[in-house]
């Protein structure tokens, strides 16, 4: 069978594209191919209310497992509650909602546990030798190493825990940096899903991840013990490394797979400081679903244009990343974030949605910097991969 569109990878971005096409273009023949046992993998995705439009909130609502009216941050010298709505989607809900929609009789399709051997803009070769054809193939198989990007890492391990007694939280803690620092900026991320169920995630902004899984699990256990909570059982564990972009050559990055439509982290579509990717995935799904021409060259040029616009808009955030990673001592990186969370709430909200104004940017940069000024200036200039060639 030839398809209108094949989605290589069933992660967040391609899963949302498939589902949005099912909603708006049910006449299309769409196939999603995922190498794991189900789409969505093993993740929790979160977003702020202001990250999405009212229409986008409406069509992804069935995927949302929990919403909160506010969130908190904690640092050694500052604690704050921000009155900004926050929501989370789990991979379990993602699969529960989207898989049945794609597996119904008709034109949409889903194949899981199918290993992908090779991809071209219009074909996909499976490991068993079967070749599939479409007007276009979108590659959404996650982060791929590129010599045209300079990346730091946001490494994390999280556990969804059922506790023996209520935890007492009414809103998430998206950063608790009152923990021992070390190789980089470390904080704990906490989502209260019910009165006695909570996700506790140990997160590190590091140059390279060096902690073992067991060390990260011990960090989670230590945090839980310090809070006075007692674990009844661990319901789920998730672990990963998100890219934090410091510098890059956008044109070089897209020349690596000429003509190949890409999505999600494969296309560099995420907030390059926070690692949040759901807003960009929702926007791309809306865009693809509204294209009348799903030919590979049209999708490639359109997605590349979307990615280039996002790249240009995020230049300021890459500058902040360089100041965070390259200026000052790794164990002092928390000071940058503590200062940031002392700024006006509207500025913080626009930062997360990637809509910082010129005034916002000046406000972030002006004042006594939390890192040595000479190192900050040196880091600011290192905006291209060639500036890192002499790095050991």
Image (cartoon, rainbow, N blue to C red):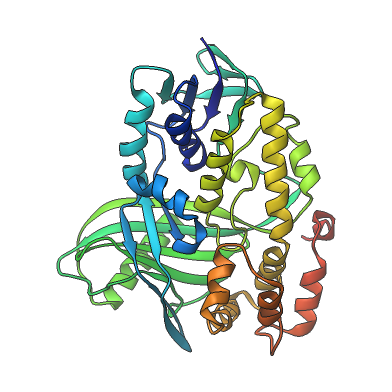
Return the x and y of residue 63 as percentages of the image width and height.
35, 46
Left or right relative to 337: residue 80: left
209 shown above or below 349: above
Q: Based on the displayed image, in which of its 4 quarters is residue 293 positioned? A: top right
Return the x and y of residue 12 as percentages of the image width and height.
47, 42
Return the x and y of residue 265 as percentages of the image width and height.
59, 45
Left or right relative to 27: residue 66: left
- Does residue 147 appear in this view? yes
Q: Based on the displayed image, in which of its 4 quarters is residue 305 positioned? A: top right
Residue at 57 percent across and 22 percent down: it is 117
Left or right relative to 231: residue 243: right
Please state which of residues 98 and 77 is positioned toward the viewer in this rendering.
98
Residue at 82 percent across and 68 percent down: it is 381
Residue at 39 percent across and 45 percent down: it is 42
- Does residue 144 appear in this view? no
Q: Based on the displayed image, in which of its 4 quarters is residue 195 positioned? A: bottom left
35 shown above or below 378: above
Give the mark count.
0
18 shown above or below 326: above
Left or right relative to 136: residue 54: left
User: Which image quarter holds the C terminus?
Assistant: bottom right
Return the x and y of residue 119 as percentages of the image width and height.
63, 24
Residue at 57 percent across and 69 percent down: it is 350
204 shown above or below 20: below
């Amino acid at each position: 069978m030839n398809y209108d569109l094949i989605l290589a990878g069933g992660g967040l971005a391609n899963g949302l594209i498939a589902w949005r096409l099912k909603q708006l273009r049910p006449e299309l023949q769409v196939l999603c191919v995922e190498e794991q046992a189900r789409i969505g993998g093993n993740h929790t995705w979160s977003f702020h209310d202001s990250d999405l439009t009212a229409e986008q909130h409406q069509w992804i609502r069935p995927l949302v497992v929990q919403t909160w009216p506010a969130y908190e941050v904690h640092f050694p010298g500052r604690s704050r509650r921000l009155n900004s709505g926050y929501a989370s989607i789990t991979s379990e809900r993602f699969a529960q909602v989207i898989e049945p929609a794609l597996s119904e009789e008709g034109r949409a399709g889903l194949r899981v546990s199918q290993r992908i051997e090779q991809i071209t803009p219009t074909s996909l070769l499976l490991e068993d030798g079967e070749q599939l054809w479409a007007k276009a193939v979108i590659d959404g198989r996650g982060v791929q190493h590129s010599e045209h990007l300079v990346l730091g890492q946001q490494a994390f391990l999280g556990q969804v825990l059922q506790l023996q007694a209520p935890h007492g939280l009414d809103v998430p803690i998206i950063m608790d940096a009152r923990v021992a620092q070390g190789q980089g900026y470390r904080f704990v991320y906490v989502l209260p899903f019910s009165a006695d169920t909570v996700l506790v995630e140990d997160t590190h902004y590091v140059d390279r991840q060096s902690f073992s899984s067991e060390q990260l699990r011990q960090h989670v256990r230590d945090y839980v013990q310090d809070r006075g909570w007692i674990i009844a059982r661990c319901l789920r564990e998730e672990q990963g490394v998100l890219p934090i972009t410091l510098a890059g050559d956008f044109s070089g990055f897209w020349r690596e797979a000429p003509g190949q439509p890409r999505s999600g982290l494969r296309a560099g579509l995420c907030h390059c400081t926070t690692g949040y990717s759901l807003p960009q995935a929702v926007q791309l799904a809306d865009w693809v679903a509204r294209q009348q021409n799903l030919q590979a060259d049209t999708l490639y040029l359109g997605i590349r244009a979307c990615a280039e616009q996002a790249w240009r808009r995020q230049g300021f955030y890459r500058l902040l990343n360089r100041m965070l990673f390259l200026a000052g001592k790794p164990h002092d990186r928390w000071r940058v974030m503590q200062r940031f969370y002392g700024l006006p709430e509207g500025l913080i909200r626009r930062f997360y949605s990637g809509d910082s104004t010129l005034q916002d940017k000046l406000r972030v940069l002006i004042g006594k910097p939390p890192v040595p000024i000479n190192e900050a200036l040196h880091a600011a200039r290192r905006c291209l991969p060639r500036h890192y060639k002499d790095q050991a």
